[in-house]
Image (cartoon, rainbow, N blue to C red):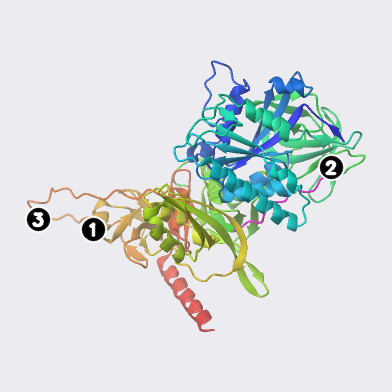
Amino acid sequence: MAVRSDIRNVAIVAHVDHGKTTLVNAMLQQSHVFNEREEVPDRVMDSGDIEREKGITILAKNTAVRYTGPLAAQLGEPDGITINVVDTPGHADFGGEVERGISMVDGVVLLVDASEGPLPQTRFVLRKALEAKLPVILCVNKTDRPDARISEVVSETTDLLLGLAQDVTEEGVDLDLDSLLDLPVIYCAAKAGYASVNQPEDGGLPDNHDLEPLFECILKNIPAPEYEEGAPLQAHVTNIDASDYLGRLGLVRIYNGTLEKGKQYGLSRVDGSIENFKLTEILRTEGLDRVPADSAGPGDIVAIAGVSDIMIGETIVDPNDPKPLPLIHVDPPAISMTFGTNDSPLAGTEGKDHKLTARMLKDRLDRELIGNVSIEVLPTERPDAWEVRGRGELALAVLAEEMRREGYELTVGRPQVVTKKVDGKIYEPMENTTIDCPEEYMGDVTQLMAARKGRMDSMTNHGSGWVRMEFTVPSRGLIGFRAQLLTKTRGTGISSSISAGYAPWAGDITLRQNGSMVCDRQGKASPYAMQRLQARGDFFVQPQSPVYEGQVVGVASKPGDMDVNITLEKHMTNMRSSTADVLETLTPPIVMSLEESLDFANDDECVEVTPESIRVRKIILDREAWYKWNAKQRRANKAAANN
């Protein structure tokens, strides 16, 4: 096999908030991608608005840095070595992006927080790397944290690596276990841009003041791309992008052969058919920019133009000798939501150019399927609604938020789990959940998880005043859990979870104790009515805001739904009173985000999403029709329980 010694392809993987994007930022700065006078934003790779607002990476993105240090000349490349870096998400809901990113690299840098250590997503990304037989570099980040415990974290990660390697080997993957014992370790403070092979003291910075040891470790331990000389073209489409001038772009990793601008090639579709096309443009990545190129060879990761409907997983091949590569495999979805048209009385009344129709909504969901490998869109009984399945509620909530910002009006149903039948029994997805919280809240968290059918697997106290608990819990038990955890722990609790397969149905779970305050007529919320009702619960709406029948305007202080007339006005009289001018004070309403609204909604409720507003409402708006439906559901549940 021939080797491209001037290229390295590496993915940076980690649990959420362990510093992947910050490390990529430092790598770009120290590779002189930016001008000296250029102001470089933090987390420059998180280019999306939602990514910056939430502080997490949602889409896997690639960049390229040019290493020209002393090691490049020693390896026979005095002009420098190109390191293609793929920045992957750390949240389990975007695991499809991780799988897609891993599919186009030759090794991974596993980033682990020096205090938190390996967490559920660390296990997920590490397992995927081992299944792909990729070499692993351990990078212990945030060594300067006051609560850092560097030696323990290295030990925990090594144990995790060897345990996963044994599991993967038992499943039939041929791994070199001896090489895993010699795990390269780099100690890093990504925010400061420091890295070293020498372990610093807990809470201290590395003794080297640049990232040179990290670059050298990548060049020594990540193999250069190999290819077969004279083999026919094989270029795997791993991502989709768009250009105002070139149209749709396909991001491809070339395994064999050469791409040349202006030539004819074949595109092996998902169904196995071959479609010929002319390659109109090749774009190489340099830093954060894409520059035109005439050709690209084995090991290169480039963007290409020429096919208007190119999709992830397809292979660009030689039309005379097509040899397509296997499709990208992703784990099946576990959570579903119903996306439908907005049929509320306020639909289309809040602004111009809103996208309202079922055709527009379906076209947008079809476009999402092109670039998102981890979701599915299925039809429902209604012609204007579709079931959208994904890895988790956050991933689907982000999709709804993106559509809202693009001008769509829609309704989104409460998250549901995707079940399956095994030997006639219903099985549901489970999650391995890790919770870190101060010791004094341990009892509250345990009680909270017990109510959601969670089973404690282990508990660890590191002696720092914090305790780590690991649970196995049904996926539906985690819907709306994060908000309650933050309430119970006064905002200090940290939770993370990863799929744990399927298990028999765990029984009914009561996720919400309080009922809804439901508006019984259309109009405007009056301060007088809200002042009279505020002892009965907390409101979601502002005074004088429009409301309609079936809208959930607040959360009741007791179980069970409560119909309220929030539009009642004070009648005028000719009676005078010495206290008539005393102003009544209203408790400020609760303002919920889209994710919080989805967590709050009951099974008979959905969330109305528009570019201007987010409202919780009943699926059946007419109150009389809703009562008939509710009585029918109770009779059906009672009959099922008796049988």
SS at badge 3? loop
Q: Which residue is mark 2?
A: 275
Residue drawn at x 71%, y 48% as measured from the top left: 130
Q: In this picture, is 574 found above or below 632?
A: above
Q: Which residue is mark 1?
A: 532
Distance from disc 1 to disc 2, alpha carbons, whole Å, reads: 68 Å
Whichever of callouts 3 and 2 sits on the residue coming sooner in the sequence is 2
Q: Main secondary structure of the magenta part?
A: loop
Q: Is residue 486 left or right of residue 134?
A: left
Residue drawn at x 56%, y 16% as measured from the top left: 36
Which mark, by number, is residue 105? none
Q: Position of residue 532 (x, y in %)?
A: 23, 58
Where does the C terminus fall, quadrant-wise?
A: bottom right
Magenta residue check for 67: no
Q: Is residue 332 left or right of residue 569?
A: right
Which quadrant of the view contains residue 571? bottom left
Q: Is the Cβ of the residue at disc 1 closer than 8 Å to that at disc 2? A: no
Question: What's under tag 2, amino acid-wise?
Answer: Glu
Q: Is the Cβ of the residue at disc 3 closer than 8 Å to that at disc 2? A: no
Whichever of callouts 1 and 2 sits on the residue coming sooner in the sequence is 2
Where does the N terminus fall, quadrant-wise?
A: top right
Query: How many numbered callouts?
Result: 3
Q: Position of residue 305 (x, y in %)?
A: 75, 32
SS at badge 1? helix
Q: Nearer the viewer, mark 3 or mark 1?
A: 1
Q: Which residue is mark 3?
A: 575
Q: Which residues are magenta?
A: 324-334
